[in-house]
Amino acid sequence: MKALILVGGFGTRLRPLTLSVPKPLVEFANKPMILHQIEALKAVGVSEVVLAINYQPEVMLNFLKEFETKLGITITCSQETEPLGTAGPLALARDKLVDESGEPFFVLNSDVISEYPFKEMIEFHKAHGGEASIMVTKVDEPSKYGVVVMEESTGQVDKFVEKPKLFVGNKINAGIYLLNPSVLDRIELRPTSIEKEVFPKIAAEKKLYAMVLPGFWMDIGQPRDYITGLRLYLDSLRKKASPKLATGPNVVGNVLVHETAKIGEGCLIGPDVAIGPGCVVESGVRLSRCTVMRGVRIKKHACISSSIIGWHSTVGQWARVENMTILGEDVHVCDEIYSNGGVVLPHKEIKSSILKPEIVM
Amino acid sequence: MLNFLKEFEAKLGITISCSQETEPLGTAGPLALARDKLIDGSGEPFFVLNSDVISEYPFKEMIEFHKAHGGEVSIVVTKVDEPSKYGVVVMEETTGKVDKFVEKLKLFVGNKINAGIYLLNPSVLDRIELRPTSIEKEIFPKIAAEKKLYAIVLPGFWMDIGQPKDYIAGLRLYLDSLRKKSSTKLATGHHIVGNVLVHESAKIGEGCLIGPDVVVGPGCVVEAGVRLSCCTVMRGVRIKKHACISSSIIGWHSTVGQWARVENMTILGEDVHVCDEIYSNGGVILPHKEIKSSILKPEIVM
């Protein structure tokens, strides 16, 4: 089976992290975002993954060679020369997605994390015999999204309603599709929206079915949702009683600590923390609801919450870092500094406190 | 860097190599690192420049000055209005012999500052260890104490263009120096006011008013009725009709929409698209962004 992952462009919403690394390679819970998806696809027998990108293929390709060998799966890139929307990339990658087998192929939005119930989706698709299956997820505020109106028992999709003012339903498009090759005949090679142009047609022909996503879902393409997503992801690890979660007297709630990271004496880590490879967390540090990327050093007595600390950065002694502070790569926060929502571009030194949320360039 | 350098090497017939620091070495350390590349058997002095500095680069006068005084080091100094922001060089006016350096002092000691252009005898390298070192704070004061350091006052303009405000001020000075030399590079025509540089491959539409102190880069398209003043427009930019831009820098391949007003140190990165009728007051925009709503006060858009 094959899969296409819509990676897209510059990842500007996840800056400053994406100023250093293309978005699919930014780690989430200590693993590149895209690897979460590729591993789940491999687990259901997908043998080839195509990445639809329009930026930096060289950086991507190097990493991908490494994953190809490790995972035993073929990964190729399909590069847009102009932005093709959410459907156009499928037409562009057509030759890579269809073969004689006639099997359906997956299409994923690269920012989505979830349980990836691909096996259940394949069975659902076979059972209804329609042309396209999509995953939907329940949300509290559907008016912010595109709502999918469907028959509850069969899953057959009636229509899509973009950002409805009146309540029409609370299930939204989760960005995970399983499509028959015939869908490609409906897509021209031009900027096209799959939600606005392609799916509504298939729904009108009563050939589009939706399955409610079991488990968590989050679009982690921006820092606030990335941090929320981490909480959901770690919670799902907890439910599966995963041995990956850290234990010990200095750990509270769900915490992931890479085996090469060092945690000092008297720290309190968690809940909802991920600490990456080679990190050094010195003694007496408090970390909660944060991600600490590879190679970071957190100095003694620092206190960090609801923030993301980028690769190879340092946070000084007694520093207080909170409220959606995002440090890019190689940022150095001096001792005793306070950052309230500072968003700091790479290769900066922070020598004075940031009292209200702002970008530091 | 290396790709660009190969192109320049071939065009200019000069050898360009790189010396890469693995740790920051300050302002003197890099000289020690590049020692083998700087001295040959000839014993000739070598130049050291700060990359952010633009000026008339009076290197010929500097070589003559250096030979004449026979000291170990020549530095260029420039007069500024607010010396207290910089390191001031205190020197004997007639000979140029440097007495001392004074960093950011409150009392007035002089108004000449280090312009970041040096001509050094190879013996200076014997004074510099391969470690983070400041040439202004550690090396030059010693040489000055031995009365072997001389300063020449820079004729013409000087600017450290390492930040946007100074980049724009520096452009004014540079174009002014072109004017003084009656340079043929400056644009002429009834749509031009003051000093303006327009690349030959750029297109300027009808009814524009361009200048003063404007540079328009290769492949730019400035549509009809556009007003540009005190700004730099980089390669491949399109400025749409009736737009008005001042005191700003427009990055490569960006576009500025119709009737847009862009001013007060707006800096657009590469591939930034400002929509029609938008106002930007000092917006600083990172690459690959679209600006769909006005920026009313200076801020960074990421």
Image: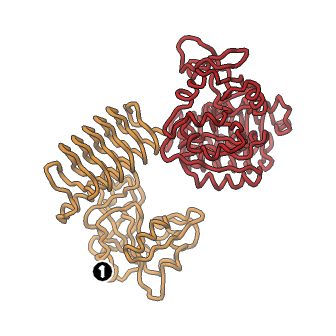
Chain colours: A red, B orange
Above or below: residue A144 compared with residue B168: above
State left or right for residue A127 relative to residue A107.
Answer: right
The residue that disc 1 covers is B64
For the point 53% across and 80% down, the residue is: B36
Q: Residues within 10 Å of mark 1 (few under 14, many from 20)?
A: few
> Which one is nearer the viewer's eye here, A17 or B81?
A17
Above or below: residue A252 compared with residue B44: above
Residue B152 coordinates in the image, percent (x, y)? 31, 71
Residue A2 coordinates in the image, percent (x, y)? 70, 42
Chain letter behind tag 1? B
For the point 55% across and 39% down, the residue is: A343
Q: Secondary structure at mark 1?
A: helix
Above or below: residue B40 compared with residue A133: below
Whether residue A86 is visible, yes or no, is no
Whether residue B134 is visible, yes or no, is yes
Q: Quadrant of residue B65?
A: bottom left
> Which one is nearer the viewer's eye here, A23 or A126?
A126
